[in-house]
Image (tube, grey):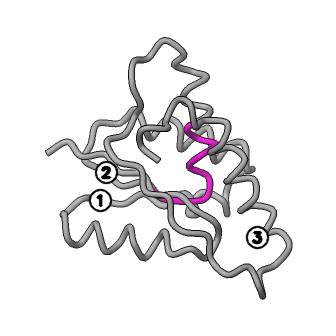
Amino acid sequence: MNQRIIICGWPNSGKSAHAEELSAKLGIPVKHTDSLIRTMQWSEVSETVSRWFDEPGPWIIEGVAVPRALRKWRARNPDAEGVPFDQLIVMPEPETEGMKPGQVSMGRGHDTVLRQLEEWIGGYL
């Protein structure tokens, strides 16, 4: 099975936990975008993740950087038919009370980029 699943959402929305649950259930490896944040700048993270989409499946890729990575993949592949995934899971927005301002900003950025991509990925939302 060549299943390619991406999971995105606000910080603390349960992306990693959901990815690990799916991984255990389906036997598909997970790539966490957060693992890159400690070693790269934000733009480098989304560029690296955009290249993960070119790898053959099966895989699960999860993280708040996913929408920006999709935008970069689309820019690099403007003539591509379709999307580089089989399933997109957008986690529900968590309670923002108690979140750090940077987390709220990341969440809002996530939503902004998804809206920018809506025409392209609308059927998957």
Task: Please give left or right for residue 104 compared with residue 80 in the image.
Answer: right
Q: What is the three-letter code of the residue carrying label 2?
A: Trp
What residue is disc 3 on?
Answer: 103
Q: Which mark is residue 29?
A: 1
The reply to whether dot 2 and dot 1 touch (C-beta < 8 Å) is yes
Q: Which comes before the other along the chain, label 2 or label 1?
A: 1
Rendering quarter of residue 94: bottom right
Q: What is the three-letter code of the residue carrying label 1?
A: Pro
Per the image, label 1 sits on a secondary structure element best described as: loop
Q: CA distance from mark 2 to mark 3?
A: 26 Å
State the extent of the magenta-drawn residues as a range. Answer: 62-70
Q: CA distance from mark 1 to mark 3?
A: 26 Å
Image quarter hosting the N terminus: top left
Q: Nearer the viewer, residue 37 or 62?
A: 62
Q: Is residue 122 above or below residue 64?
A: above
Q: Is residue 64 above or below residue 11?
A: above
Rendering quarter of residue 26: bottom left
Q: Point out the residue furthest to the top here.
A: 79
Task: Please give left or right for residue 77 compared with residue 37 in the image.
Answer: left
Q: CA distance from mark 2 to mark 1?
A: 5 Å
Identify the residue at horizontal 72%, vertical 43% (top origin).
43
Residue 20 part of the magenta segment: no
Q: How far across and how far down the image is residue 85, in percent?
A: 37, 40
Task: Please give left or right for residue 106 compared with residue 115 in the image.
Answer: right
Q: What is the three-letter code of the residue carrying label 3?
A: Gln
Q: Which comes before the other along the chain, label 2 or label 3?
A: 2
Q: Point out the residue furthest to the right here.
A: 101
What residue is disc 2 on?
Answer: 59
Question: Few, some or many C-alpha atoms within 10 Å of disc 2 (few <14, some 14-19, many ≥20)?
Answer: many
